[in-house]
Image (cartoon, rainbow, N blue to C red):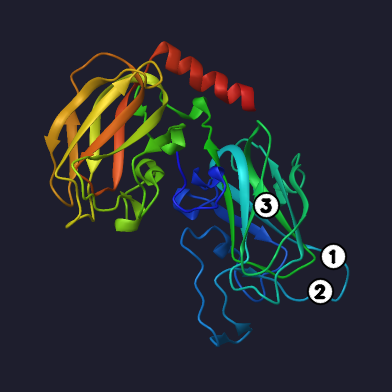
Amino acid sequence: MEDAVNDRPVWTSQPDLASRRFGGTVMWATDELFAEKENLVNPWTPAHRAETFGPKGQVYDGWETRRHREPGDDQAILRLGLPGLISGVVVDTAFFKGNYPPHVSVEACAVEGYPSAPELQDAAWETIVDRAAVAGHIENFIPVSGSKRFTHVRLTMHPDGGVARLRVHGEAVPDPQLLDLGALDLAALENGAICTGCSNMFYSSPNNLLSPGLAAHQAEGWETARRRDDGNDWVTVRLAGAGVIRFAEIDTSNLKGNAPGWASLQGSDDGGDTWFELLPRTRLQPDTRHRFVLAGTRGAADVRLDIFPDGGVARLRLFGALSDAGRKHVTSRFEATS
């Protein structure tokens, strides 16, 4: 899938596993005197109003610690909203120009359950970003290699300063013990689905379609540019695992003047080489959650959503049951990365 913005690493098109939109949280920080640690996982682009001062100084949309006068570093622990494989991190120092950290490092760990921040101090942390130089007022892209599933990350600033956002891009890997493999949303990011291609993502990422919860506004869905030809827009999804889809939900909530006029769904069981019909071209209404019964019994591993001619969709839900092959895939993927 092509990136929405030129000159950005391909892995930034993957979901931000740490985003507050997916339930990510900043559990603990050594210090947050100037700006709150919780800002690190805000899903929106950092904002700034110059000469906006509070009791502790300039107000920043980020995490900022006091100046060190003794040796030491500042740290923050984040719990990922979507545990999974990490492809890269973005250390965004937007608007931190004279107060950003010169170096950072990132560690990660995988733990079961819901440990507290003090309990995590003794976890088996692994370094995924060794002490790396960063610049101010810029997105610092740092690729990560590895094939292990993580649930938490720890950001260290050497020695102190401010970071606006920490984006942790990758693919979600769910724990199959926490899923009902016979009845689940096969297209949910949190269950392991991912968008693999699309015709256009001018306004927003197609992975928004697979996000948890309802979209709060238009920007939380997938929206394409206006077409000026005879074609139509589309997106492909690799399901959490192969399975039979019983119900499809195409949600156009918040899209009132830019919803598609029609949509169709196709499935594939051979990686997209051939497609078969799941839902014929069907009329849609603006600002509506549409639920459709799919009568077919043929299993699919990939799904293609076509919208006619263009527009936006807030969410795509594909409810069904994993096949034996799909169950094996979900279970073996978790085991291979744990």
Callout 1 secondary element: loop
Label 3 Cα neighbours within 10 Å, binned few <14 / some 14-19 / many ≥20:
some
Estimate the x, y position of residue 212 in percent, counting from the top left: 39, 44
Q: Is residue 83 left or right of residue 326?
A: right
**Marks 2 and 1, how far apart in space?**
7 Å
**Marks 2 and 3, how far apart in space?**
23 Å
Pointer 3 residue: 117
Image: 184 above or below 91: above
Q: Nearer the viewer, mark 2 or mark 3?
A: 2
In this rendering, does residue 144 appear at all?
Answer: yes
What residue lies at 30% left-to-right and 29% top-to-bottom?
319
Question: Mark 1 or mark 3: which comes first in sequence?
Answer: 1
Q: Are marks 2 and 1 in contact (CB under 8 Å)?
A: yes
What residue lies at 65% left-to-right and 37% top-to-bottom?
111
Please state which amino acid type lies under the numbered disc 1: Gly
Please state which amino acid type lies under the numbered disc 3: Ala
Q: Is residue 123 left or right of residue 174?
A: right
Pointer 2 residue: 68
The tag on residue 72 is 1
Label 1 Cα neighbours within 10 Å, binned few <14 / some 14-19 / many ≥20:
few
